[in-house]
Amino acid sequence: MGGFPFIHAVTNSAALRRKDFLAVAESVMRALGPLGAIHLRSSQASGRRFYDLASALAARQKETGCWLIVNDRVDVAAAVGANGIQLASHSLRVPEARAVAGEIPVGISIHSLDEAVAAEAAGAAWCVAGTVFETPSHADREGARIPFIRDVARAVAIPVIAIGGVLPEHVAALREAGAYGIATIRGAVWERQMKAPKTDPSSGETVLVRADDAAAPEPITRYISAYDWNSGRGRDHHLDGERRSAGDSAE
């Protein structure tokens, strides 16, 4: 499966309701390649639709190098062969998920230092830590800010993925604080339009054109560009629980 991804594009229920969701998701996977993962997550999709989407995206993992990480639905992750599972507070615990999903790596979402330490002790392969900055989806939750990520990264040896209002301009500071990578929902711009039919009145022909700027790259690539990939730092994954010493890098 290669190294653990740095950039995590997380879906939401609204994204999965789109008729062209698969086309959008596959374009994100191609853009991220082996540097990224797409988290399939929805609290509203039916079991059948969730499975069908997961199955389609799982088939793109080898082709693109991008991981499919299935949130909460351990059974679906195991059935389709996802590269990873992401658990939430309401999900199965890590040992239970492993009993169902075998060797599939399992991560867990945490919101406190104690939860991060407990996740690692339970066998989590990574943790998604937040909310770092305020977000519309968690308007009642004050952002924990970058010091929270620093504290978590110092307390655990597993990769820490920062989530919550993270913008490309935050990436450098989060890396300096010890974050292995970042996760974003809005940054993937799931609501953008892919293509739309347009009739050229001069010719009477109907053609397909991008509804946004055809020359614009996938929005998620802004996060990739924010990393200094040429520095060689941050390329090692630590799913075996090993990390560099503090003197080696900020990670």
Image (cartoon, rainbow, N blue to C red):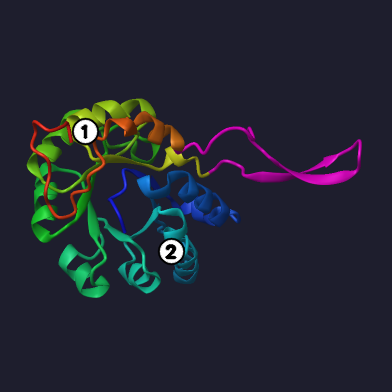
Q: Is residue 240 left or right of residue 31?
A: left
Residue under the image location 26 percent in, 65 percent down: 104
Q: Residues within 10 Å of mark 2 (few under 14, many from 20)?
A: many
Residue under the image location 36 percent in, 45 percent down: 35
Magenta-span inclusion, residue 193:
yes
Region rendered in magenta: 191-220
What's the amino acid at mark 2? Ala
Which is nearer the N-term, disc 2 or disc 1? 2
What's the mark number on residue 144? 1
Q: Is residue 123 above or below residue 176?
A: below
Closer to the camera, 109 or 137? Answer: 109
- Residue pointed to by mark 2: 58
Secondary structure type for disc 2: helix
Closer to the camera, 141 or 177? Answer: 177
Cα separation between marks 2 and 1: 33 Å
Residue under the image location 35 percent in, 34 percent down: 165
Q: Is residue 89 visible?
A: no
Q: Is residue 209 visible?
A: yes
Residue under the image location 28 percent in, 27 percent down: 172
Figure quadrant of the C terminus: top left
**Residue 238, percent from left and from top:** 18, 49
Q: Which of the 4 quarters of the picture holds residue 179?
A: top left
Q: Is residue 71 left or right of residue 62?
A: left
Task: Nearest to the eye among marks 2 and 1: give it.
Answer: 2
